[in-house]
Amino acid sequence: MADSASLLYNQLKASEPFFLLAGPNVIESEEHILRMAKNIKGIATKLGLPLVFKSSFDKANRTSSKSFRGPGMVEGLKILEKVKIAYDLPIITDVHETVQCEPVGKVADIIQIPAFLCRQTDLLVEAAKTGKIINIKKGQFCAPSVMTNSAEKIRLAGNPNVMVCERGTMFGYHDLIVDPRNLEWMREANCPVVADITHSLQQPAGKKLDGGGVASGGLRELIPCIARTAVAVGIDGIFMEVHDDPLNAPVDGPTQWPLRHLEELLEELTAIARVTKGKQRYQIDLTPFHG
């Protein structure tokens, strides 16, 4: 298990121009997930981008207890395993509790730690014990330096296969901003850095509902802006949630990128990546220049 994880990890680290973690936010149905996986794989293959298919079996941190959460772990993992077999795709999905790590590790190739849980030592250690690649989302409330400690928790638990993911920083109560400096500073964690270009554009719990309560919104039209920035900086991987019918998506509709525009956006991002030197640290010479 650990050997296959290391093999995939090294393949992703070596990806040029970047690797892609993509799929619908949550599992809605087996038919929908299989169809999305087929379409996204076709586009990624055409563009030569290594793809890890993403979808969640449970959205445990919804704004409202009435919100759709997904099919749950047992049914969700069965569906993700079908995707894995049918389309020969590695899988990434998230865990929220320590007891989920072992069963999820039997199906997922990458276990994702949600942003709200990025400092939860027991969860990080239990996920690390599976031997699978661990992708840690940086909390919206965290400085980039925190990711160095979180990544080290994975390594100290005996797992070298870790990556960290930027998904925006709280700006007031109802907004996030993306600071491109974080994409550089998070390299201090000494592992691949991923940019979540869709969650970064959430507007957390900023929309009042008619029946009372609040819901999260988002700025889908700015996804290309954040994506272009991340690629120009020299990101290792792009994380994005993609949907064929975003207006009717049960979770995070406002920040899911339309499937119909996926190929067009990825074509542009690969073109930017070919000309940027973002993955190379600039050697700045401060000796006097005599022109």
Image: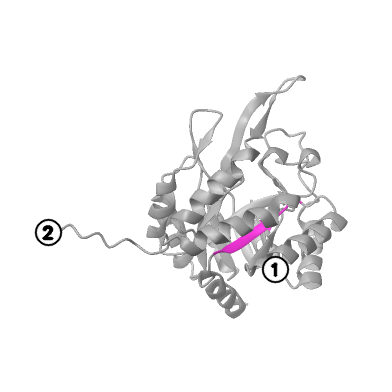
Secondary element at image label 2:
loop
At x 56% / y 62%, what residue is drawn? 134
**Residue 72 seen by the camera:** yes
Depth check, front residue: 23 or 6: 23
Q: How many marks?
A: 2
- Give residue 46's mark: 1
Quadrant the C terminus occupies: bottom left
Q: Point out the stretch of residues depicted in magenta.
A: 18-26
For badge 1, the amino acid type reads: Lys
The N terminus: image quadrant: bottom right
Q: Are marks 1 and 2 in contact (CB under 8 Å)?
A: no
> CA–CA distance between discs 1 and 2?
49 Å
Q: In the image, 70: left or right of 201?
A: right
| Residue furthest out toward the bottom | 3
3 over 28 or under it: above or below: below
For mark 1, does the 10 Å Cα neighbourhood hold few (<14), some (14 to 19), or many (20 or more) residues? few
Mark linked to residue 290: 2
The image position of residue 96, as x and y in percent, is 64, 51
